Image (cartoon, rainbow, N blue to C red):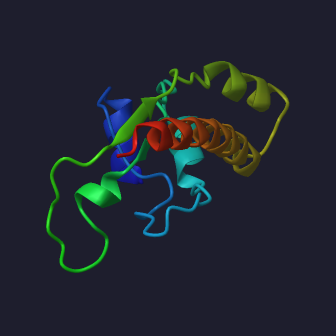
Amino acid sequence: MDFLLDKLNKGAWIHFFPEGRVCLTNELLRLKWGVGRLISECNIPPLVIPIAHMGMDSVLPNKTPYIPQIRKNVTMLIGNPMDFARDIELLKTLKKSPRDIRKHITDKIQEELKVLREKAQVLHAEFKT
């Protein structure tokens, strides 16, 4: 996480799975608080672009044989950028602990990903062949 924080402080783009792993069961996993830590400890809080996708497991199955498939539907939704600068400023003014700030940020991202995921599921079901 320190490596990623250093990259963000240098203005670089990072992409990672906030659940800390790839989910093989298509369930909604709790996000790791490291997500909130990266955002709250960054010199300039980065914009967060939430992304939800469905159908990647049909392109590259999660079970053997691991053979990529063609002509499969994949649905990807990209949410609105999330800016946490004001949240962080307010929470620090209220003297919230670093743990509370991390949790607040992580919870907001979790909620946005849940909404995007539900929309993606509906769209994916409509276009499934």
Q: Position of residue 18 (x, y in %)?
A: 48, 52
| Residue at image coords 38%, 39% | 75
Specify the farthest residue to the front: 129
Residue placed most toward the observer, 98 or 21 = 21
| Residue at image coords 49%, 44% | 125
Residue placed most toward the observer, 55 or 16 = 55
| Residue at image coords 59%, 44% | 36
Work out which quarter of the rendered image holds the N terminus and state it: bottom left
Left or right for 51, reference 71: right
Left or right for 73, reference 40: left
Left or right for 57, reference 24: left
Left or right for 58, reference 121: left
Q: Position of residue 114 (x, y in %)?
A: 63, 43
Specify the farthest residue to the bottom: 64
| Res. 8 image quadrant | top left
Does 63 sit above or below residue 86? Answer: below
| Res. 77 image quadrant | top left
| Res. 109 image quadrant | top right
- How many numbered circles does the render carry? 0
Residue placed most toward the observer, 126 or 43 = 126
Q: Position of residue 21 (x, y in %)?
A: 42, 64
| Residue at image coords 68%, 19% | 86
Q: Position of residue 80 (x, y in %)?
A: 52, 21
